[in-house]
Image (spheres, rainbow, N blue to C red):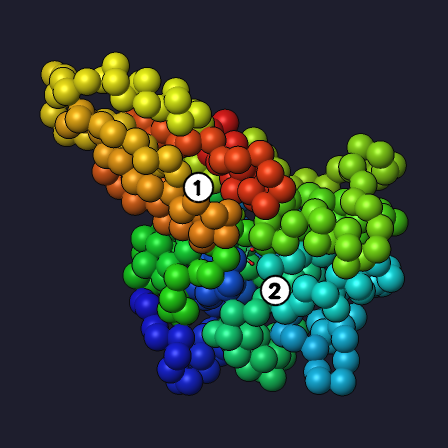
């Protein structure tokens, strides 16, 4: 059931659902999350079950923003055993916002949400509906909310309330916070190895992170620590049902010329094309969609576009390869994973 996130009663209902150990579809500025009380093992187990996600894959725990006189949210001190100075700089620079920090976990706290690892992923989101629910849930004793993206394991992340309902059916309570502004999942920085390591690129770029924390990002291979299991770093992730292929604008235009105007033996659309470049096609087998020309716009629309194109029932989605520059790293990463599926 989808409830309007602007309705105070709906927010209260959402917070109460979390406190009661139930699941909640929760909007964030990145993507919608499938939320549960991170301190309630049975509630966390419901997330893994609903998503079909292996229970040793750690979840991100969302905390309410800091009190006016504090830099670091109270939830951080509850779940993490320490915050290195460079991580605190990142918190000051980017929270509330689309950044997740991996920190050493306080023993005995949030173990199920952390997938049993001795670290914990923490994020303080900025979406007003999410913030309101986190604050009200905290009043009811919920100090952190575990929320992976609200999609079946390995599938495209949801950026609208309708996407979430489509993944989990009408029984799930979903708060509608509108389409997500960022559109791809948070940037993840591992702060548990003594130096910052980028685990997942997102809207916050490498350069922004390095500038804010005053030190270079390191490659995880350079730091002696076991690799955390990160399902977001599995190759085949973010995959629609159709096969995704990345191509240059020239390759796309050539392929379209080869297809010509033939309808082929099977009726209906067979290939979807998502490109920044304006392309021409006269083939009845092809549906064309334009990708925004800027990285932010492309990120915001990416998952909704993949879902929409998938819904045509196409076998192939051909996507124009994004530019190589730093601003596009998050979009590039998601598309490469979708294409690897
Ligand atoms: O934008 C986001 O981060 C969204 C919204 C809902 O906040 N959440 C999200 O969660 O993307 P999820 O579960 O789909 O992705 C979590 C990623 C995974 O790659 C997971 O392995 C990694 O974060 N992660 C979480 N805790 C970790 C830990 N302790 N160590 C290493 N990686 C961790
Ligand atoms: Mg996910």
Q: Residue at x 40, y 32 (%)?
A: 319
Mark 1 surroundings: few (<14), some (14-19) or many (≥20) residues within 10 A: many
Looking at the image, residue 26 lies above or below residue 53: below
Residue 181 horizontal/vertical position (percent): 46, 61
Q: Is residue 302 left or right of residue 21?
A: left
Element type at mark 2: loop
Task: Give the percent coordinates (x, y) of residue 99.
Answer: 65, 58
In this rendering, which labeled residue sits more in front, label 2 or label 1?
2
Q: Is residue 174 above or below residue 5?
A: above
- Respond yes or no on whether mark 1 lies under 8 Å from ligand 2: no
| Front one among 19 and 217 | 217
Q: Nearer the viewer, residue 174 or 248?
A: 248
51 lies left or right of 229 = left
Classify residue 275 by image quadrant.
Answer: top left
Nearest to N terminus: mark 2 or mark 1: 2
- On-image quarter of the N terminus: bottom left
- Residue receiving disc 1: 155
211 or 162, which lies in front? 211
Disc 1 secondary structure class: loop
Mark 2 vs ligand 1: CB below 8 Å = no
């Amino acid at each position: 059931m989808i409830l309007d996130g602007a309705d105070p009663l709906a927010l209260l209902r959402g917070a109460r659902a979390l406190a009661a150990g139930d699941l909640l579809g929760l909007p964030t500025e990145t993507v919608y999350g499938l939320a549960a009380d991170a301190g309630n093992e049975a509630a966390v187990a419901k997330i893994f079950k609903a998503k079909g996600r292996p229970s040793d894959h750690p979840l991100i725990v969302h905390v309410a923003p800091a009190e006016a006189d504090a830099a670091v949210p109270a939830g951080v001190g509850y779940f993490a055993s320490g915050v290195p100075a460079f991580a605190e700089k990142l918190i000051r620079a980017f929270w509330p916002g689309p950044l997740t920090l991996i920190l050493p976990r306080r023993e005995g706290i949030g173990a199920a949400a952390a997938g049993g690892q001795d670290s914990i992923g923490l994020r303080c989101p900025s979406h007003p509906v999410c913030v309101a629910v986190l604050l009200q849930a905290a009043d009811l004793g919920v100090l952190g909310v575990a929320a992976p993206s609200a999609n079946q394991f390995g599938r495209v992340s949801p950026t609208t309330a309708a996407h979430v309902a489509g993944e989990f059916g009408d029984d799930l309570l979903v708060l509608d916070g509108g389409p997500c502004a960022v559109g791809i999942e948070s940037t993840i920085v591992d702060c548990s190895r003594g130096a910052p390591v980028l685990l997942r690129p997102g809207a916050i770029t490498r350069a922004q992170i390095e500038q804010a924390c005053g030190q270079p990002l390191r490659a995880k291979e350079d730091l002696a620590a076991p690799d955390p299991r990160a399902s977001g770093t599995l190759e085949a992730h973010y995959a629609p049902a159709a096969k995704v292929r990345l191509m240059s604008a020239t390759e796309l235009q050539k392929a379209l010329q080869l297809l010509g105007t033939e309808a082929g033996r099977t009726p209906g659309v067979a290939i979807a094309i998502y490109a920044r470049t304006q392309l021409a096609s006269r083939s009845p087998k092809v549906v064309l969609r334009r990708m925004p020309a800027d990285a932010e716009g492309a990120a915001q629309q990416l998952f909704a576009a993949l879902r929409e194109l998938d819904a045509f029932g196409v076998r192939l989605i051909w996507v124009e390869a994004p530019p190589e520059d730093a601003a596009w790293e998050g979009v590039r990463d998601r598309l490469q994973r979708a294409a690897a599926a």
